[in-house]
Amino acid sequence: MHAIATLKPDSRFVAHVAPSPNHDERTGVAAPDILLLHYTGMRDMQSALDRLLSREARVSSHYLVCEDGAMLQLVAEADRAWHAGASFWERGNDINSRSIGIEIVNPGHEFGYRDFPEAQIAAVIELTQDIVARWSIRPDRVLGHSDVAPSRKDDPGERFPWRRLAEAGVGLWVPPAPIDAGPVLGPGDLGDEVAAMQQAFAAYGYGIAPTGVYDTLTAQVVIAFQRHFRTERVDGRADLSTIHTLHALLAAKQAIAGGKAPARKP
Ligand SMILES: [Zn+2]
């Protein structure tokens, strides 16, 4: 444990700190191996910052990136910040212990979701490139909050430019398969095709079991996937484009998952 007053930026791209009391020790992991991105989902930057620093709110993140590109560090990367809540990815919960969390200022779906300004995205790219390099975080483990909590969360949402990050070396992304006519699975459907699709989402990392029932959770996982990887139509229905994009991602993941060294401390 260390005193809040000693907080210093872990990234050379971050000039300012605003220490949050809301953190504790990581448990059960040697080093963070997930980078989790959020939007703040509040009216403005100051309300978001106030909340992230409020002892009563009991939430925090490691970083806050403002719309003008200014970046603040709130919690040391070595510590566990409290941003993920109840969440799951690839056989693991306690995503807070496994991850570094970045809050990106945007009003979000509740208060007027809008495009992320260029200066803000440039800052996010700089910061995330630095974090994934220092901690050797695998591309397929750069995730949105909605990926790890699809039944509760929508952030950072379909306007977040995942493709640009991937082109800058951050995160896994494949060109989405074109939307085309063809069979679509949707709420209420039952059977082996639904189970196979659920199995593919689970293999990618989503918290879903192959029940064969296209239930509410299934639709929520499909929406989370579409927000991240196939943003042209976010409707919770598994059309062929969604399923083909998922399988292309799985192949890309399998290609990288074998050969990388485990995460290490910088
Ligand atoms: Zn979030």
Image (cartoon, rainbow, N blue to C red):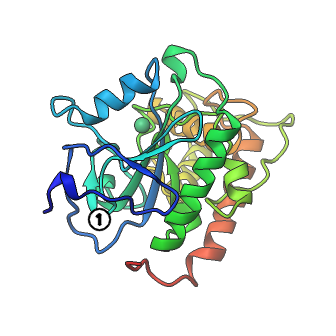
Using the rendered view, name the quadrant where residue 158 is placed.
Answer: top right
Quickly name the residue at label 1.
78
Instruction: Give the secondary structure at mark 1.
Output: loop
Q: Closer to the camera, 25 or 255?
A: 25
Q: Quadrant of the N terminus?
A: bottom left
Q: Position of residue 116 (x, y in %)?
A: 64, 33
Q: Quadrant of the C terminus?
A: bottom left
Q: Nearer the viewer, residue 50 or 6?
A: 6
Foreground: 98 or 118? 118
Vertical order, 187 against 218 (above or below): above
Check disc 1: other Cα within 10 Å, few if <14, some if 14-19, many if 20+.
Answer: some
Horizontally, residue 75 falls left or right of residue 156, namely left
Q: Position of residue 150 (x, y in %)?
A: 45, 37
The percent coordinates of residue 34 (x first, y second) are 44, 60
When the figure is inspected, residue 227 is found, relative to residue 28, above or below; the finding is: above
Residue displayed at 19% across by 52% down: 4
Q: How many marks?
A: 1
Q: Residue at x 53, y 48 (%)?
A: 198
**What amino acid is labelled 1 in the image?**
Ala
Image height of 164 relative to 236, above or below:
below
Q: Quadrant of ligand 1?
A: top left
Name which residue lies at 55% across and 82% down: 260
